């Protein structure tokens, strides 16, 4: 099974949790794109109705409009019934690293507002230890670039300021901020690291999503696995 086929199957499983009348948190990224398209198809055939979505990025907003999903905001609906989002990496505790697409701040705000929050991914995103082969994105205020880089580096990371692929200069988030990509290697205590990062002046949000997900659907090898947080489990026991 290709990665896209695995992502699509995981997305469809998550969408089956949607009930009529729900207010949804719509994450960002390629896996969520499959979910958005499928939600739009169900709305078009009247299998879903009275659905509203809160998008986590400008890209998601455009995708939802194309799929004809009515949109709303957290100002109108500060609590959401269900959120569906992807992950750059996750473990069997359903702690995750996100922010590869630069939408981590809005994604985390939406995740925190959801009664139920589901992660969807292909099996290549599963790991025993967060940070193994994956950087941690950190959103920072532009005024703090050099001090923030140095402070994150002191925590043991190899750091770089993410550059834009479409223009010269740093990538600018939907919030007008910059992103540091911090490579800590395998992270033995993600909760401690997340607290230390938040203590650095200029850091607005981290890509460490700890304790948010209630459920995950992982596509791979011809099937989709349903995972709930397993505090004492390892990846090998799960797959």
Image (cartoon, helix red, strand yellow):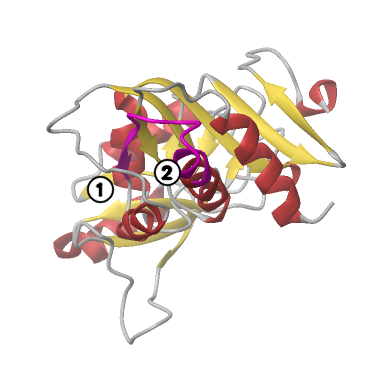
Q: Residue at x 19, y 33 (%)?
A: 74
| Count of numbered marks | 2
Up/down of 111 relative to 39, above or below:
above
Question: Which picture quadrant has residue 205?
Answer: top left
Describe residue 81's horizontal placement relative to residue 34 as left or right. Answer: left
Q: Position of residue 133 (x, y in %)?
A: 66, 52
Element type at marker 1? Answer: strand
Q: Residue at x 39, y 75 (%)?
A: 163
Q: Residue at x 58, y 27 (%)?
A: 16
Where does the magenta region start and end?
A: 41-55
Q: Is residue 132 magenta?
A: no
Up/down of 48 relative to 156, above or below:
above
Mark 1 nearby-residue class (10 Å; few <14, some 14–19, many ≥20): many
Nearer to us in this view, 2 or 200: 2
Mark 2 nearby-residue class (10 Å; few <14, some 14–19, many ≥20): many
Q: Residue at x 27, y 56 (%)?
A: 148
Image quadrant in which the C terminus is located: top right
Nearer to us in this view, 188 or 108: 108
Up/down of 30 relative to 232, above or below:
below
Describe residue 2's horizontal placement relative to residue 69 as left or right. Answer: right
Seen as rendered, the residue at the extreme bottom is: 168
Describe residue 162's horizontal placement relative to residue 185 as left or right. Answer: left
Nearer to us in this view, 57 or 229: 57
Up/down of 132 relative to 13, above or below:
below
What numbered label is drawn on residue 27? 2
Residue 130 can be seen, yes or no: no
Residue pointed to by mark 1: 203
């Amino acid at each position: 099974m290709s990665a896209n086929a695995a992502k699509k199957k995981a997305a469809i499983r998550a969408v089956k949790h949607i009930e009529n009348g729900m207010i949804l948190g719509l994450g960002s990224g390629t896996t969520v794109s499959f979910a958005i398209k499928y939600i739009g198809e169900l709305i078009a055939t009247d299998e879903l109705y009275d659905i509203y979505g809160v998008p986590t990025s400008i890209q998601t907003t455009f995708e939802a409009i194309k799929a004809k999903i009515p949109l709303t905001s957290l100002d109108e609906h500060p609590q959401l019934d269900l959120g569906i989002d992807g992950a750059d990496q996750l473990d069997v505790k359903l702690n995750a690293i996100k922010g590869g697409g630069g939408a981590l701040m809005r994604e985390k705000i939406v995740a925190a507002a959801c009664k139920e929050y589901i992660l969807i991914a292909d099996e290549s995103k599963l790991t025993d230890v967060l940070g193994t082969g994956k950087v941690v994105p950190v959103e920072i205020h532009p005024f703090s670039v050099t001090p923030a880089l140095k402070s994150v580096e002191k925590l043991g990371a190899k750091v770089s300021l993410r550059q834009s692929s479409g223009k010269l200069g740093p990538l600018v988030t939907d919030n007008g901020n910059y992103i540091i990509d911090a490579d800590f290697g395998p992270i033995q205590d993600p909760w401690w690291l997340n607290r230390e990062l938040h203590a650095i002046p200029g850091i607005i949000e981290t890509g460490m999503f700890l304790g948010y997900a209630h459920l995950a659907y992982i596509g791979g090898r011809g099937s989709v696995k349903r995972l709930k947080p397993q505090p004492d489990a390892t990846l090998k026991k799960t797959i």
